Image (cartoon, rainbow, N blue to C red):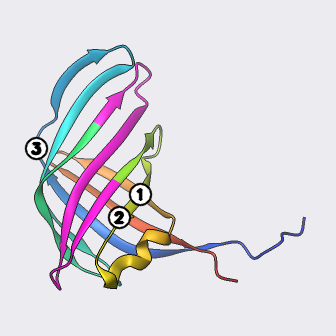
Amino acid sequence: METLAPPPKLTHLFTLRCVVDPPMEIGNGPYGRRRCVPIMSGSVRGPYFNGEVVPGGADFMLVEDNQTTHVNTNYVIKSDDGALLYIRTEGTRAGPPEVLKALMEGHEKYKWMNDRVIIGRATRAKGEVAYDAYFLENDP
């Protein structure tokens, strides 16, 4: 089957590693179990920018009975050149931990990320969350 345009390609944006505190169990509700994972620190490395995770963010989760987890993460990165980037990660983790990413940036140098679809693949270990982020290129 012929497509109208060439398929988009993924380009590596950054790799993020966060140090996290143990989850705080908020409790069960009508939609599942709520928890909060505080983000303490971390680093971001990639071809477009490098930086450090500013303490104070958190990953808010809703865990369904079947263990499907809905994540809503908010934190700030301070880039090596001093720009502050607000990062919001939201998505559903079921099976492999793919997560949809959204960046909201006001700094002129990084505004181009606001118009990109950014996806990632996350891994978790005790005390750490890490993921690789990619943006979707749809230029012909």
Label count reads: 3
Residue contact at pointers 2 and 1, CB within 8 angstroms: no
> What residue sits 43% from the left and 59% below the top?
120
Q: Mark 1: which secondary structure?
A: strand
Amino acid found under the numbered disc labelled 2: Met
Q: Mark 3: which secondary structure?
A: loop
Residue 51: image location, x then y, percent: 19, 75
Residue 65: image location, x then y, percent: 40, 18
User: Which badge, 2 or 3, is on the more N-terminal residue?
Assistant: 3
Q: Does the magenta run of residues contain 111?
A: no
Amino acid found under the numbered disc labelled 1: Lys
Q: Which residue is mark 3?
A: 21
Q: Which residue is mark 2?
A: 104
Q: Mark 2: which secondary structure?
A: strand
Amino acid found under the numbered disc labelled 3: Asp
Distance from the alpha carbon under mark 1 to that under mark 3: 21 Å
Magenta region, residue range = 61-88
Location of residue 55 with respect to 16 vertically, above or below: above
**The furthest residue to the right:** 1
Disc 1 packing (10 Å; few <14; some 14–19; many ≥20): many
Q: Which residue is mark 1?
A: 101
Question: Mark on residue 18?
Answer: none
Q: Is residue 6 left or right of residue 51?
A: right
Q: Is residue 114 left or right of residue 125?
A: right
Q: Is residue 126 left or right of residue 109?
A: left
> What residue sits 47% from the left and 39% below the top?
95
Distance from the alpha carbon under mark 2 to that under mark 3: 25 Å
Residue contact at pointers 2 and 3, CB within 8 angstroms: no
Residue 93: image location, x then y, percent: 43, 40
Location of residue 80 with respect to 58 vertically, above or below: below
User: Which badge, 1 or 3, is on the more N-terminal residue?
Assistant: 3
